[in-house]
Image (tube, rainbow, N blue to C red):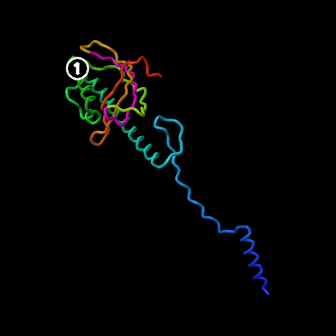
Amino acid sequence: MPTLSGRLASIIVAACLLTGCQPPAPTPSPLPSYRCTPEAGGAEFDCSQKQYDDMVAKDKLYAEAEAVYRKFLAEDIRIMRAGGVDTPTSVLLETTSGAFLDDVMSEYTDMRSIGLHAEGSDPVLVALVRQPGLSKGGSTVVLASCIDSTATAFVSHGKVQKHGPVARDTVYFAPAESSLRIIGADGGKVTSCGS
């Protein structure tokens, strides 16, 4: 005759078999979740680690391009106030290359030859915006800028020759040596930087 403890063990085993008793399943570790933002801006979305890593790398390129552009713009203003230059400055060599460097140097040497320099307020950078999906001449990053230089006067021999324009440009950047450089720009005069 089975003992009381033996009968209880049989009842527990039978109850477990009937109800499907199993040891608790291990809780799975949550998968890492990544949130990405579209390159052109917009709402975040779930993404893979590769998409996230690509987004971080592209953000870093855009941040570098913006820093290069701002450094170039400050040097451009300095050179215009000085009345141009005959040879590229170290900052121009750090921030520009190729045809773009040739173009700005042509403008600076022309300024120097006719005695033209900038006076008045500095040009104002109104907008600097990412331009995803654009590329030209091997560029890896593209920004659109809008600069209002209407309060900047260009003076030669003591007389104001003209005032600066409002200009919207698409600026192309590519790696050169160990950093991004401006390799080209398209654009021209506009009536305002507004939409």
Q: Does the magenta stretch include residue 146?
A: yes
- Tell me the residue at 53%/40% (across/down): 44
Give the total of numbered labels: 1
Residue 113 vs residue 22, the one in the foreground: 22
Q: In this figure, which residue is indicated by the disc labeled 1?
A: 110
Q: Is mark 1 on a helix, strand or loop?
A: helix
Residue 78, x across and y down, in percent: 29, 27
Residue 52 vs residue 105, the one in the foreground: 52
Amino acid beneath label 1: Asp
- Tell me the residue at 27%/34% (across/down): 91
Q: Is residue 52 magenta?
A: no
Residue 117, x across and y down, in percent: 27, 20
Q: Quadrant of residue 154?
A: top left
Segment colored magenta: 137-155
Q: Is the magenta stretch mostly helix, strand or loop?
A: strand
Residue 12 vs residue 61, the one in the foreground: 12
Residue 18 vs residue 165, the one in the foreground: 18
- Tell me the residue at 21%/23% (across/down): 109
Q: How crowded is mark 1: few (under 14 residues within 10 Å), some or many (20 or more)?
A: some
Q: In this view, does 145 lie above or below 158?
A: below
Q: Quadrant of the N terminus?
A: bottom right
- Tell me the residue at 37%/25% (across/down): 169
Which residue lies most toward the front here?
18
The answer to whether residue 152 is left or right of residue 28 is: left
The answer to whether residue 183 is left or right of residue 37 is: left
Q: In which quarter of the image is residue 83?
A: top left
Residue 176, x across and y down, in percent: 28, 39
Which residue lies most toward the bottom here?
1
Q: In this view, does 16 lie above or below 34?
A: below
Residue 5, x across and y down, in percent: 76, 82
